[in-house]
Amino acid sequence: MDFGNLFGSPENFLSYTMGGLVFGAIYALIALGYTMVYGVLQLINFAHSEVFMYGTFAVAWVFILLHGTGSATWDLGEAVPVLLVALLAACALSAGVALLIERVAYRPLLNKNAPKLIALISAIGASFALAEAMGLRDRFAEVFRLDDNLADYVAPGKARDVFTNPVTIREHDLFTIGGYSLSDIDLVIIVSALLMMVALDQFVRRTRFGRGIRAVAQDPESAALMGVNPTRVVQVTFVIGGLMAGVAATLYMMKVGVTRQNAGFILGVKAFTAAVMGGIGNLRGALLGGLILGVMENWGSAVFGQSWKDVVAFVLLVLILLVRPSGLLGEALGKARA
Amino acid sequence: MSDNNEAPVSLGKSTGAAPAATATGRALLEVDHVTLRFGGLTALDDVSFEIREGEILGLIGPNGAGKTTCFNVMTGVYRPTSGEARFDGTSLTKLKRHKITQLGLARTFQNIRLFKSMTVLENVMVGTDAHSKVGFWDALLRTPRHRKTEAASLARAKELLDLVGIKARHDELASNLSYGDQRRLEIARAMGTNPKLLCLDEPAAGFNPAEKVKLMELIRKVRDTGYTVLLIEHDMRLVMGVTDRIVVLEFGQKIAEGSPAEIRDNPAVIAAYLGVDEDAS
Amino acid sequence: MNPISNALRPVGQAWDSVMARYSRQPVVVKVLILFVIALFFYALPLLRPPLITTNEIDFGGVMFQVAAFALVALGLNIVIGYAGLLDLGYVGFYATGAYTTGVLTSQHGSWPFFLALPVAIAVTMVTGVILGAPTLRVRGDYLAIVTLGFGEIIRICVKNIEWLGASAGIKDIPHPNTIGPKATPPFDPGGLFEIPRVEWDGLIPHLDKDHPVYFLVFGATNAIPYYWLILTALLLVLLGDRLVKNSRVGRAWEATREDEDAAELMGVPTFKFKLMAFALGAAIGGLSGSFYASGQGGYISPDSFPLLLSMLFVAAVIVGGSGNRWGAIAGGALVAYLPERFREFADYRLLFFGVALTVLAVWRPEGLLPPRRTRRAKAAAAEIEALEEGELDEELEETRNV
């Protein structure tokens, strides 16, 4: 246990804290998916982690498509065009996967009014099936005789290894606070997350769809009687969660650059923890929870060592669920005031 | 407003509790200045009354009067904001729910909450298990205590099913029973816990007149076997016909208390039910 | 209804009629039948029937895996199927049993296996109580996530603590002691006597004396004695399960699962019984983990207990039939057996079970062999549906004729 590592110098402290905020922003974006689905359906979308994971692969694939497999290092400015395409691809793929999950794993159960635990089991199955499918992508390509054409994308024989974006995006320090330098990538991440949060907040509060979401969150039957189509609302909710995850995936790949088929799991758990910490169903709670979690786990890694980093998330998760399951901000989606 | 303490005349046999040979039964459950607020809403406002041993007490009032809320406070499901409910002298406020049942207070539910996937017999046996001291080791090793308790539970359960009239369906799944039989099962299950006070929450809901008559007979039979009964009901004829005393609530306040005859003529009660004459249900 | 339900209903009905005929027999006949069935399962790895046997791999080893999974499923069935607590971190208990055994027999002691076994079970049970006490007050889907969190916390802790072997794990976990003279390789295989096995030539059996089982030598060469050990444990647990389920404990569990609030109001101390189910499940998980530690080449590491093992355990119970001990065993056996029997399948195992979980959740949430009560309820519902549809058709006929 080394508290000195964290609190000893301002640089260290800021470094860990800011680093935590950056990842926290990514967690927050993924957490939005969990929180919105829970707000509308009172269901934990266990498979949301895979929605994110597919987005990360989309980003890597776009870079391979547009640049090729040779490794390269670009500046952020250079990378912007490809990044934008990657963002579109990630959002599209993530949203698509989310819709697939809604259609196959949830809708039949919701139509039958099945107990919540069955829906959770269904989601767990979908989560594992999706993750495994990605891990078996080289086999699937083989089956369709596409393994030669798609070799770069499916990494035959190595489908379960880490999948790397051949392009590394160089971080440039923008300005320095108290000895710690904030990089351009970090800034982009934090600003993007905040922007998306604001946009989503406005969407839920101001638009017709947003009202529909809040209505279904409060009382699906009355909402239906008022002319709101609950199925459509649920679909939109999943799509929004997918889009947010796509943005998160792009930012993640910008910063980290590698992914694998089980990358979703640990990030998903952390994002879910963030959502619960902030108050599940509460959009601002997702942001708050994400940032707090990012910072706390980084502090944890400073004090206890890198290998204990993930434990922080799990311990926080367990503590929150035991001590204050309603979270810090408590409110639910349905109760957001206009 | 009449506040009449005239006691019921007949008591029936009591089960092991202090015998009350006189006309006045001792207070079994006391509602003592109970107020319950949910946020800005005052559901119950300084309500006080008591249920005496051996009587059938009716709790009535128009919709929204607070009957079910009062009922939930009396059975320990809600904690009052102020005041307390006492059963047999013991305050119910801090007690865990299963302990309240073990004290001798049992209830049925307005919307029927049977254990759907268990059989009729098993449902009642969950009730009769309430006082069982059998634990894991007794079950695993089939100790004499387990065998004795199990046999007694089974016998009592069958007895109760017979009492309510559904003994023939004992091996049916609870969910496969007809509505009327499900209500009877609920009563049998509650009686299985060997209560001193049996609380019935709208037991006649959904019954036709013939079934209601049979229910009245059953309630009387239950009381005559030695139980005290609290009844929440909408159906006036049923309430007037079977209860010994009635408490009337309106907007969370007690507005009348007395015998059926007194309540029927009470102007405040009639006003509360304005427009609804006593023959409607 | 749907094709899966329709296909499986006759299975349930056949099972019901077999069980009905069985229960009509006098006690002596029942005991005899059970004895013969048990004997069959003990003899199975020796009999090596064609089609079932996995040829290239050690069939005894496969049977060991199958029995181990079945035992785990049985324990988890008490938690999920009886008490209705969705536990997604069961691998934590499995690991606790394995590591306790590893620590006592190899890492920090040299206890004999059979002495370490009860301690491992006790430690795991205590862990279950410690985990359960705060957790079981939490609502259904949150409980699932909390248990998942605990499972991972245990794994990560084990990975990081030196005293428990850290990433390297614990090796050289000894086998249970041999019953009879010890083996002295390379000539003396030890044991009291030899048991031959059966070789099949198409459909004709031959006695094969070249690959005997030495009774009762626990070594690295032959998994069959391990299989017998686990099978014995499985039978004992099965018996205990039946005794406890058919008592007020079982009724309390069912009532709690069906409607916890109503159960409380009927006098059931639900928290106590939930904790009991959790602790029992933990104990059985620890028992299984103990056998695993001593059996699988005597080596365990944090990587042996990943989250997806918890998911496979859950899949075994749910797919098999939650709430039915035979369904759970069947599910466990399926999860362990299919990847071994169909080797190409092994890589697709998780994908297959993931898809199976979702498909079953949608079409047959009660699993392959659900408890009789569920089958009765579903049968009644199906009848009503059929009647309603029949009536509807009749009404249409009438309006058309008018």
Image (cartoon, rainbow, N blue to C red):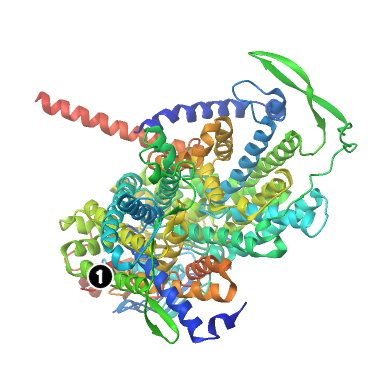
Residue B125 placed where, x, y %?
Answer: 55, 49
Residue B264 placed where, x, y %?
Answer: 27, 67
Residue A190 in the image: above or below residue A117: below
Work out which quarter of the rendered image holds the N terminus of chain B and state it: bottom left
Residue at which label 1 appears: A201
Q: In the displayed orientation, state which residue is furthest to the left.
A: C402
Residue A324 vs residue C29, the one in the foreground: A324
Work out which quarter of the rendered image holds the C terminus of chain B and state it: bottom left
Q: Quadrant of residue C135?
A: bottom right
Residue appearing at x 27%, y 53% in the figure? A92
Residue A295 placed where, x, y %?
Answer: 46, 75
Q: Is residue C84 left or right of residue A326?
A: right
Residue appearing at x 28%, y 64% in the figure? A80
Q: Give the letter of the chain under mark 1.
A: A
Q: Is residue C151 left or right of residue B50?
A: right
Residue B246 shows in the view: no
Q: Quadrant of residue C59?
A: top right
- Callout 1: SS: helix
Residue C251 placed where, x, y %?
Answer: 56, 49
Residue A130 vs residue A173, the one in the foreground: A173
Q: Is residue C35 left or right of residue B40?
A: right
